[in-house]
Amino acid sequence: MTATEGRTLRLIVLALVAGGLVLPILAGLWETARAAFGVLPAIGATDWSLEPWHRLFALPGFGTSLTLTLWTGFASTALALALAVGFAAAMYDRFGVKGGARLLTPFLATPHAALAIGLAFLIAPSGWIARLISPWATGWALPPDVATVNDPMGLALILGLLVKEVPFFLLVILAALSQLPVRRHLSAGRALGYGRGVVWIKVILPQLYPLIRLPVYVVLSFALSVVDIAIILGPSNPPVLSVAVTRWFLAADTSLILPASAAALLQSAVVIGGIALWRGAERLCAVLGRIWTRRGGRGVSAEPGLMAAGGAVVVLMGLGALALVSLLIWSLAWRWSFPNALPESWSLKAWMRPGSGWDAALENTLIIGIATTTVSVALAIAWLEGEDRARLPRAGWAEALIYLPLLVPQIAFLYGLQVVFLRAGISGGMIAVIWAQALFVFPYVMIALSDPWRALDPRLLRAAAALGAGPVRRLLAVKLPILLRPIMTAAAIGFAVSVAQYLPTLFMGSGRIATLTTEAVTLSSGSDRRVTGVYAVLQAALPFVAYLTALALPAFLHRHRAGLRGGAV
Amino acid sequence: MRLPLLAALATGIALPALAESWDDTVAAAKGQTVYWNAWGGDERTNDFIAWASDELEAEYGVTIQQVKLTDTAEAVTRVIAEKAAGQTMGGSVDMIWINGANFLSMKEQGLLHGPFLHDLPNAKYLDLSDGSAAVVDFTIPTEGYESPWRLAKFVLTHDSARVAEPPKSMAALLDWSKANPGRVTHPAVSNFMGATFLKQALSELTPDAGVLQGEATDEAFAEATAPLWAWYDDLRPTLWREGTTFPENESVLQQMLNDGEVDFAMAFDPAAAAAAVERGLLPETVRSYAPEGGSIGNISFVAIPYNAAHKEGAMVVANFLLDPATQARAQDITVLGSYSVLDPAKLDDEAGAAFAALPSSPALPTNEALGRTLNEPHPSWMTRIAEEWARRYTE
């Protein structure tokens, strides 16, 4: 294992990540910024000016959009975090990390759009819940005129974000808790007379939070800039900022691209400012928390709060599950009108209809997903192997580099990136879409693969080296087979992320590359829930299949190797 | 019923004066693939275009490749980009399904091939007199630069099981909505259908509808739209969700009618409701009707860009679309359900019989129920109404 060899690999990987991931984002941001200040030669705008900003501020509903974005973003993130911590505290011991993770997988695998579409139908005034309890309990022969979806306050949007974010937080928290001596803290705390809930808040949370800080920022950034969920569940007149920006970018009036670019830039400012604000709030909580902790209150009263959080999470999961089931039912329905609890007639027409195009969309989704995942997993393995060979821990800047695509709002650089790709002559095709999606798939693959990779028992490698295996052979013959399960899991996560991508596909494919997600979001604004159901079911099923493969393949390959079964993860 | 007509056409039903040049066109068109840029949001339309391609291939050796657009402006932008790049021949757009503002901008910039309408043998089935709907597009005379292919007309749809006597005018709709708050809404005004709803109201409420045929100046706009805003100020608080939010488009509104969230949907296609019943998307008790004073209507056209690579093929397609057999099939409720653009008075017995033999649907309005067609206002009115509405009612 020579130092130069490790360095060459590291340099190649770094160059790939910098050139393939970071540079496009920066170039995209740069093009967006130019357009935001009046320079977009393609539509004849060549002079630097503040005009786009004046136009943006004068667009009807701009102020409300901004306020809505801040409100829904912060409220959903804070609430999701509180609920997840509460649930983890209430349920810890009751199920193990593995069982919990298995339970959460369906929610993580389901793309946002599918979940949001199902949820929209579930909670609408004419939705499934209302149908289940009408008219016998409510007396409604017709649905009531109450705003349970697309409400002006964005409450339905917050609910949708919660259903998606809480499982993510739970998974991150479960992983982080495995690094903390939770049980000892709990027994020590209880011995000193602290209630279980108070031990969680005063002792465990302060240690847990630093471990999950980055994921919290990722969620905050996501909640402040989400587009697909906001289109389906959010207010419409005016919508949240990210949706407004998308609409302006795609409007028939091309001159709107300039104020849209300004708004996209503002969107990144909102995210950066939001994270800074959150960080300030963290400090404040730390100071207040310390004062509170020093007062030494034993307070057993935190327990009901934890139970309430636990209950709320169970309700959220139930809503998410019902949302998915309702889509499946719709895809098999012919007519299902209010207030019937189930369709009055069934049909397979939505699935059978030739030329409804789901086959083409499915094919595109598969090709893009497999290509993107393969590239991302290969790059992630190369990165981790480079770290191994250099025997260096990951630097802070490298961690930030990986997270960059998740922290910068997509809308802020995607339009600029499209301009860059157009100039390079690779716009509107599969390659452009695959590349753009890899920007978002790679970080998730890295996050999923890093910990298991590092947890590999170093004695195995030393033994292999002592037997004369070089670095390449150690990688191929020892590491990859042992790590097959986590690699497959990371690939499945990457595939799920790829399937869920909406904006990168829409922008880079110039609207011409239809995937299950772009079709499902488009169809959600159409009138046929049965066809939407087909797309959403397929969209949710693909990642499931990927996860199943990730579980089945290693089990099959290792069926004769007892030591590799169930051990390595 | 279709084949005899086509055969008759092929054996020279066309006017002798045209025959020679038209034969040349047909000969040149053989083997061409026509890239028809058409809005791709409606599956039945896409299927219809695919059917047309099969028919044309068998008859003329011409095939259609539909370029599915989400917005017609995309095709216009592409032609402009090609012009900017100096590509004056062999362009990628052969034919566009076009209307209104897009037609105006292409015609003004000299981006259209033509005039070609009078070269089409089947143009003889059209009412080509001055001011007829077949030769005027949103008040702009088409001057032969585009060829009609389907009729669009504003209609309201209601469920007769819930609303027996629907309001027959916009003023009556306001009274109805006051009596039944929360049961009426319209698509967002940024959407074409939402803006059309306001144009329909404007045409009914404005004191002098003739003003709408000219360009909307500041003064004319303020005066003509004052009654519209007064009416809307009264209507808005009675709308679904008190007019704070609106369905995104007519499809969502149709779904809301199906769910029972509202009592009215609207469409720019008299057969839309009947087609939806056919597909199980609306209950069988829905009915469509036009406001009694007449409703806004227009004809959709196809145009050929000046730099199209396959002009002859495109003309053959345009001619095929005007064939009475094609129009009858398009009007078939089980196929497309879009009304014919041909002048019934000019059809021979055989063609007339083809229309009479079409299957009917109770959700399909009769010609009497459709009433007269009001002219589209000049395109500038629509833009201004949408802007003014956003300014007034977006908080």
Image: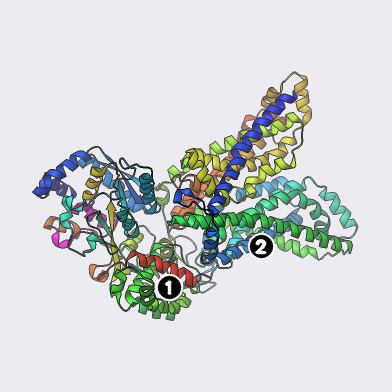
Under tag 1, what secondary structure? loop
Up the image or down, A304 lies above or below A114; here it is: below
Q: Quadrant of residue B277?
A: bottom left
User: Which of labels 1 and 2 is toward the front?
Assistant: 2
Element type where label 2 sits in the image: helix
- Extreme right residue here? A192
Q: Is residue A474 above or below residue B389?
A: above
Which quarter of the picture shows residue A480?
A: top right
* Number of the label disc, if any, that sits on residue A75: 2
Give the magenta range. Answer: B321-346
**Residue drawn at (46%, 56%), measured in percent from left and top?**
A255
For the residue marked with disc 1, what is the amino acid?
Val
Q: Nearer the viewer, residue A470 or A297?
A: A470
Quadrant including the N terminus of chain A: top right
User: How many numbered marks have been drawn onto this rendered protein structure?
Assistant: 2
Whether callout 1 and callout 2 share a subunit is answered no
Q: Chain of mark 1?
A: B
Distance of label 1 from label 2 (alpha carbons) = 33 Å
Q: Point out residue B365 in the picture as x, y percentages from the top left corner.
A: 28, 67
- Which residue corresponds to mark 1? B184
Q: How far across and down, in percent of the image, does residue B62 sit?
A: 25, 41
Q: Of residues A100 and A559, which is closer to you in this image?
A: A100
The residue under label 2 is which amino acid type? Ala
**Could you tell me which quadrant the C terminus of chain A lies in?**
top right
Which residue is drawn at the image coordinates 40% and 78% (left, top)? B231
Q: What subunit carries mark 2? A: A
Residue B108 x %, y %:
31, 56
